[in-house]
Amino acid sequence: MTLAGHYDVVVIGGGHAGIEAAWMASKLGADTALITMRYHAIGRMSCNPAIGGLGKGQIVREIDALGGLMGMAIDRAGIQFRMLNRSKGPAVWAPRAQADRHEYPKVMQSLLAEARSLDIIEGTVEAISTKASSDSGGRRRVCSVTLQDGRVLKARAIILTTGTFLSGLMHCGLEKTEGGRLGEPAAVGLSASLRGLGLELGRLKTGTPPRVHRDSIDYDLCEIQPGDEVPTLFSSMTDAITQRQINCWITWTNDRAHQHILANLDRAPLYTGQIESTGPRYCPSIEDKVVRFADKPRHQIFLEPEGYDNERVYCNGISTSLPKDVQEAMVHEVPGLRHAKILQYGYAIEYDFVPTHQTKTSLESKLVEGLFLAGQINGTSGYEEAAGQGVVAGINAVRSLNGDEPFVLGRDEAYIGVMIDDLITKPPVEPYRMFTSRAEYRLRLRADNADQRLTPIGRALGTVDNRRWERYQRKRQAMAAIEALCDPGRINGMPLRTWIRRPNADVADFAAALARLTDQTFCADALWQVLVDAKYSGYVERQAQQIERFRRLESLSIPEHIDYAAMPELRLEARERLARVAPRTLGQAARVSGINPADVTILWVYLSGRRLVPRAR
Amino acid sequence: MLDRLDETIVAISSAPGFGVLGIVRLSGPKAITIADCMAATDTGEPLAGRPGSTRVSGNVQIDDGAGLPAAFYLFRAPHSYTRQDIVEIHTVGSPAALDLVRRKAIELGALAAGPGEFTARAFLSGAMDLASAEAVAGMIRAQTDTQLRASRRMMDGTLAKHITEVRNELAELLALVEADIDFAEEPIEFITPEVLRRRLGEITERLQRLLRTATSVERFDVVPHILLFGPPNAGKSSLMNRLSGTNRAICAAASGTTRDILSAPVRIGRGEAILLDTAGVSRSEDEIIAAARAMTMSTAERVDLICIVFDLAKPDDEHVFDTVGSLDTGRLIIAANKCDLVSADQARQIGERLRSRGLGPVCLVSALNGMGIDALRNVLAEALGSTMTTTLGESVLISDRQGAAVNEASEAIKRAACLSEAARETIDCADLMAFELREALDALGSVTGEVTTEDLLSQVFANFCIGK
């Protein structure tokens, strides 16, 4: 056993959650260590090489607005950019980009290299050690981590971001392999260590499709899917995207492919009982789709190149754990893939997670002080969801060491807030993925205004640096100048503000109209922001009223160690559920499933008896 | 309930159904303003100019020109039960009258209070000890349970069926619109604008029809109502007790005992009816009695059947039939009471004379010894026969709160439909549409239970093949 260092914060795992957590912790001045099995695997994309999408693109913009890395990385490593949902209102537009699978981790690694107080350590964590906590509650507090090779790192706080590596088990047909990702070992000892700390572990499943050689595809039989002519940026630190954009392709499964699947269900781990854990309903395997939706004659496949110089093409839409020979047979029936050479077979993976009734809104464990959890270990799925939690866990680990109040984003402030609140009040039983419909205040939580919502908060926290702050200020000034022109301004006899609310008003139009009123020119970003704000005025005010009602309950905090058993007027079920979830505000209590309005009123009356204190922001 | 502390709420706060005087209580920032819109004070001065903790007498206006004598008790924040401005309107104790006052307040912007809402407000700013918190919690639980039982009874009925169906339909549409947003990458057309338009139109139509045809549960039940109508001391209360087999109405030899409307369920034929016992119709100096009588008259115009109770021993009371003549009413039954006090011959004679008026069937009864009661029951059953089936078959009961929720939902759906008007190929303002539909669903959810996002997503995952 060798003591290999003293750190304020130790992050375990170099995935998308771990990266943001380590970045935030070091940005806030903490001596931070990021432990990863392999340096070059930092930021690797286990599943599809893409960032963003519905709900997820919004999260990336929020991470960026708070000073995180994901937006900058994808802006540099993206090979095809598309704004999804353009035919709908801008509130639900969502940026998405294909990434160069090799480039993305490299960019991430170079960005992390800029961190001032961050050590990256290669190794596998075997155990977490604790000591008696100084608070009288009898809880334990983290003190160190032990690596497989015997090295010990002292840690004042630990952030667990283990992804699919915690006792990962891969299934490909009846073959079972231990591992956290194809070709990489699992972290097995850590599961036992967590159980030893008293944490309850659960098991989830996810899957990935086969990858084929790009030169073995007959593109004439596929439908082309080009990127946007003008790419939309993820990061407000990026000036423009100059790299060349590639095309993706679309093809479809057919009845013959389905027949191969149906004939081999007895070798499909999903149906033999070999896989027992729950997979996501929104991302079913191809065998699941064919069985459950037997009436559908075909299913869509996106053929997504994994990079400029990468021979692999990701077959998005046919994730599977069928045996290799069935994957071969099935793929070769698909138009365009008749001669496809499979370079990597699809597989399913099961992994341990820590069900979130054991976790606080700050993402700290309820049981072990100083232990934070982020990403798939909290039952989520997706790079963006993981990274969003990494930001919050990284910030809160440092805040807890400084004795500061936890940083909590409200459901009315960010998708990240919606996600964490959902995780805490309704612990997931399948991998949790963000959808825009999960956000009640969707008209406010837009991708376009993430900086307006969150950059001032990040600045106050200390995660937004001067460069980002200056850019933000410039946009604000431009917006104020545009707004000032809008009110007296008229165009074709119509007030400018009314004119820009026309359904098809665009930035170019708006800029041209303003050019008739002033010599000043404005950046497209600010113009667009004012345009979208105008579009939603009225609705945003109605939403603001809803938010105000919501905040009233949200501002009433519940003491951490409240005894629900001493409230006989609460129904037994309500007492049990509240005790399990331990909501931190009255509003959160109201969202716990199975809690009715009368329960909330009764709880409130009890809290009034204890001199309720409004939550400090 | 806790999220609307700055709204003004109203409720009838005297015990239901009893008492000469009743209280309607308003609490909140607009309590005094709303009360002033209804108050005609004796001095003509508005309540707003008065200090707290005062009593002001006058009339409470419930309709154009119509008023009831009332006393207004004014309590100013923070010196009141809820620590907000409170106005208590003390007026005629009849449930129907109190309900009119309450409705007027709602019309003027007050919200119907939920169970325990006044009590909950009472603790807004006050620090209180745990013991009193427990007492209050118990009270809220009890009130909620009572209301829950009442609404469950109602939810077994037609309204629940209608609302649940509409809500499910709406949830399905919202799920489809949400899917159209969240699963834009899927090669699935979840719903076409045309179908969406048509189905929204159908839902609006259905909700509007529901509002048009629904019967207010605060005012009347679906069970047919029979009003006992007659001069004071004709024995209406005794007859009510006899028919219902209870001792609901207090009978006294003194005239004018019953000054508000009492009700009791009675078995009539194979069904049930509600018997309403009212103040006797006579001329009186007492203002409140006069008002109660006016209530009787207005009630008479809304019941299914009127049973005129007439004292055989007091032929002078026949003036009651003149009053009846002025009513725009349905069927009449005449119960000639107290036939135990006159000879059989006399009774028959008076009976004939009454029949000759041609107002309706005449039954000779004695509420005292039960003579002729079964015959009266049969006559009532026959007269109600058709009424009972039609009333029960078509009418939907709705409370004010539910009515308001249904209306709110209907308005939101109309706005959603407007948004889809221009849509041809795709639902281009799906985000706004979802906003409106969600509002409608939340409004209906307050009647039949919440629909969560998880419910919506489950619906989509169950019906569509989602995911790449």
Image (cartoon, coloured by chain):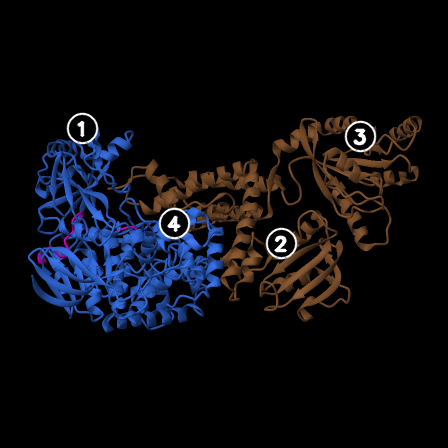
Which of the two marks, 4 or 1, is nearer to us in this view?
4
Q: Give the range drawn in magenta.
A: A39-54
State the SS at label 1. helix
Q: Where is residue A510 in the image (x, y as percent from the top left)?
A: 36, 63
Residue type at mark 1: give it. Answer: Asp
Query: Where B159 falls versus A458 (above or below)?
Result: above
State the SS at label 3. loop
Q: Can residue B276 be seen in this view?
A: yes
Residues packed near mark 3 inside 10 Å, few (<14), some (14 to 19) or many (20 plus): some
Which residue matches tag 3? B370
Measured in 3D between alpha carbons, the distance from the residue under mark 1 to the one under mark 2, in whole angstroms, is: 65 Å
Which residue matches tag 2? B11
State the SS at label 4. helix
What numbered label is drawn on residue A266?
1
Q: Does the magenta stretch include residue A52?
A: yes
Q: Which chain is brown?
A: B
The C terminus of chain A, quarter of image: bottom left
Residues packed near mark 4 inside 10 Å, few (<14), some (14 to 19) or many (20 plus): many
Residue type at mark 4: give it. Answer: Arg
Residue type at mark 3: give it. Answer: Gly
Whether label 1 touches label 2, CB < 8 Å:
no
Query: Where A157 falls versus A291 (above or below)?
Result: below
Q: Which chain is blue?
A: A
Q: Position of residue B138 (x, y in %)?
A: 53, 53
Measured in 3D between alpha carbons, the distance from the residue under mark 4 to the one under mark 1, in whole angstroms, is: 40 Å
Dot 2 or dot 3: first in sequence order is 2
What numbered label is drawn on residue B112?
none
Residues packed near mark 2 inside 10 Å, few (<14), some (14 to 19) or many (20 plus): many
To the question of a shared chain for discs 1 and 2, the answer is no
